[in-house]
Image (cartoon, rainbow, N blue to C red):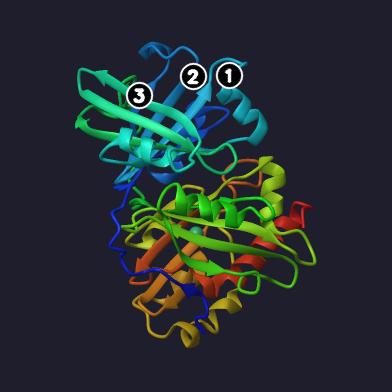
Amino acid sequence: MKTETITGTKETAQKDFLPLQGTDYVEFYTGNAKQAAHFYMSAFGFQALAYAGPETGTRDKVSYVLRQNKLTFVLTTALRTDNAIADHVYDHGDGVKVLALRVDDAESAWYETTKRGGKSFMEPKHLKDEHGEVVMSGIHTYGETVHLFIERKNYNGPFMPGYQAWSNPYFQPSDTGLLYVDHCVGNVGWNQMNPRVKFYEEVMGFRNIISFDDKDISTEYSALMSKVMSNGNGYVKFPINEPAEGKKKSQVEEYLEFYNGEGVQHVALATHNIVQTVTELRNRGVEFLKVPSNYYDTLPGRIGKIDEDLAPLKELGILVDRDDEGYLLQVFSKPIQDRPTLFFEIIQRKGAKSFGKGNFKALFEALEREQEARGNL
Ligand code: FE2
């Protein structure tokens, strides 16, 4: 049943020129960061952590920093027109601008990637305050998305210089069990997947660990192709999707049209208890895609024995897939802004290191029903 190609899983003897310790934060450019921060706190269970704005000496933008376990989200809005953040929101709507990666040496990360052809977004910058020093640098990736390299080993403040601690004494929502970023998926244009794979291989030293062709990821109507890129230690995984020819418009094309270019399609957030997490998220108003209930009729035969009861999985629309190493449970939110662009995946891995290939068809049919309702299929 498993036809996906998994390659290059053996550690190479070569030294990793870009050692990454994981995702440091995800920054969203939004139309209204104050309200977006409230949404992520009330609906997703994040806590207030830090703030930057005119009160902290930042004149042209505000940023709210939220945290839940190892997840850090930054919500940023421009305070003026004629500003790169305002232009980004005008062009793309709300979306992910920065996938920030934790490094031990941000200067070396910048030199190693730019000398291999990475286009600089930010030369190494040393930021200091009374809590110590953060060094950051960055390069461009697909569309207007960037990777920042964050070195914070000599810093013990709330977030980074320029930010002050922020909390709301009246509103401390409880956690929903979201733990860390499992993977972040990028949508790129026609014929752009392989060049982007090459970028991650050559510029960032990633490996292609899984490939899906359009036969793996197609429904009666639409198709896409995907390659999963992983860094050396597997802490950072970036699947890259491109549209493929089908009878109707691919979900990736709908994204590219509404995001007005390439960008982050979904961020997968890990939990140790998906039933509890999704119950909490639903109770707080987060909407998820639903697969037809007959998906669950054939599930035990396909998946074998799992620890969870089927009834709550069915009730919450949680999907299950198995690979050689174990199984995983996953569910996908509806888009979390007005444009049909960015959404979240909630994932619980029980040994499986794959991405739910067995669920693609059911999932994409569910996505197509939404796409059709929007008149975009
Ligand atoms: Fe995913």
Q: CA distance from mark 2 to mark 3?
A: 19 Å
SS under mark 3: strand
Residue position marked by numbered label 2 in the rendering: 61
Query: Looking at numbered disc 2 in the image, what kind of residue is underneath it?
Result: Lys
Q: Residue furthest bottom?
A: 301
State which tag comes first along the sequence, 1 or 2: 2
- At x 35%, y 58%, the residue is 271
Label 1 belongs to which residue? 83
Q: Position of residue 15 (x, y in %)?
A: 28, 54
Q: What percent of the width, then of the height, locates residue 246?
A: 76, 66
Do the CB atoms of the residues marked 1 and 3 lie less than 8 Å apart? no
State which quadrant residue 108 falls in. Answer: top left
The amino acid type of the residue labelled 1 equals Asn
For the question of whether residue 283 can be seen, the reply is: no
The residue lying toward the viewer, choosing from 135 and 57, is 135
Q: Nearer the viewer, residue 52 or 185?
A: 185
- Mark pair 1, 3: CA separation: 21 Å
Q: Helix, strand or loop at disc 1?
A: loop
Left/right of residue 296 with respect to residue 12 in the rendered view = right
Do callouts 1 and 2 mark residues in contact (Cβ within 8 Å)?
yes
Graded by Cα atoms within 10 Å as few (under 14), some (14 to 19) or many (20 or more), the crowding at tag 1 reads few
Q: Is residue 40 visible?
A: yes
- Pick whichever of labels 2 and 3 is earlier in the sequence: 2
Identified by mark 3, the residue type is: Lys
